[in-house]
Amino acid sequence: AQTVTQSQPEMSVQEAETVTLSCTYDTSESDYYLFWYKQPPSRQMILVIRQEAYKQQNATENRFSVNFQKAAKSFSLKISDSQLGDAAMYFCAYRSGNTGGTSYGKLTFGQGTILTVHP
Amino acid sequence: DGGITQSPKYLFRKEGQNVTLSCEQNLNHDAMYWYRQDPGQGLRLIYYSQIVNDFQKGDIAEGYSVSREKKESFPLTVTSAQKNPTAFYLCASSIRGQPRPQHFGDGTRLSIL
């Protein structure tokens, strides 16, 4: 079974600064997908960024980028030029790429990291 | 606009009572999922369904039941066997067979009276 670990329960950053959230995972699969979701106080889950394991290039979405280290099974999220609206709980999630099993599509989540942005 | 609708937003359960949480989607997604969120534990998968009339247990299915009679609907029943039902429940859906991310509803907060 896959596991996802976020070792930072809470992080804080000054507005306009950069912060990195950590995520490690454990899997024996070679084909999989990794996601970062944001959950603001409204509790809505918002997709921030995704990474396909077969792609060596790190994904980037505007101010959000990842550092994907497949061998180390590490998937960190970097937020540049932090804004007050970035304050939220961030979840790292794993999804199997094995299309043959009934578990295809399941997401396994980490415990989450609460990000506080100071003005 | 397409999306996922969860109702009610808040729900209270009495001891020994079964309650049903509604989840409806108009995204034409095949797969639907139910997650439970407790403080400090992230989201845990309760049940999921890849197609109509078929569903599988997730990691914490005990005390819960589901049905999938229609593609757009995936209701979750919290039975009296679930001794600690107080949590935030999230429903999600995705396109089956493609590496697309899941779309989430706004959640239902269930509390014990």
Image (cartoon, rainbow, N blue to C red):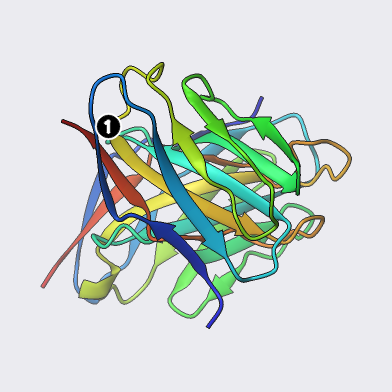
Depicted A42 relative to depicted B91: above or below: below
Q: Position of residue A14 (x, y in %)?
A: 17, 67
Counting other residues with Cα less than 10 Å from the Cα at mark 1, is it few (<14), some (14-19), or many (20 or more)? Answer: some
Give residue A9's quadrant in the image: top left
**Front residue of this view, candidates A24 and B41:** B41
Q: Residue at x 38, y 56 (%)?
A: B7
Percent position (x, y) of residue A22?
A: 43, 46
Residue extending farthest to the right is A100
- Residue located at (60% from left, 55% from top): B73
Q: Is residue B68 left or right of residue A114?
A: right
Q: Can you give x and y, in whole percent of width and height, for residue B44 in the image?
A: 48, 34
Nearer to me, A35 or B25:
B25
The residue pinned by badge 1 equals: B86
Instruction: Report in which chain the residue with disc 1 lies.
Output: B
Q: Secondary structure at mark 1?
A: loop
* Up/down of B59 relative to A33, above or below: above
Horizontal side, residue A56 vs residue A46: left or right: right
User: Of residues B48 and B80, which is closer to you in this image?
Assistant: B80
Give the farthest residue toward the bottom. B1
- Point 70% across, 68% down: residue: B28
Amino acid carrying label 1: it is: Thr
Q: In the image, what residue occupies the spot 78% across and 47% down?
A: A97
Quadrant containing the C terminus of chain B is top left
Farthest residue, direction left: A119
Q: Is residue B24 visible?
A: yes
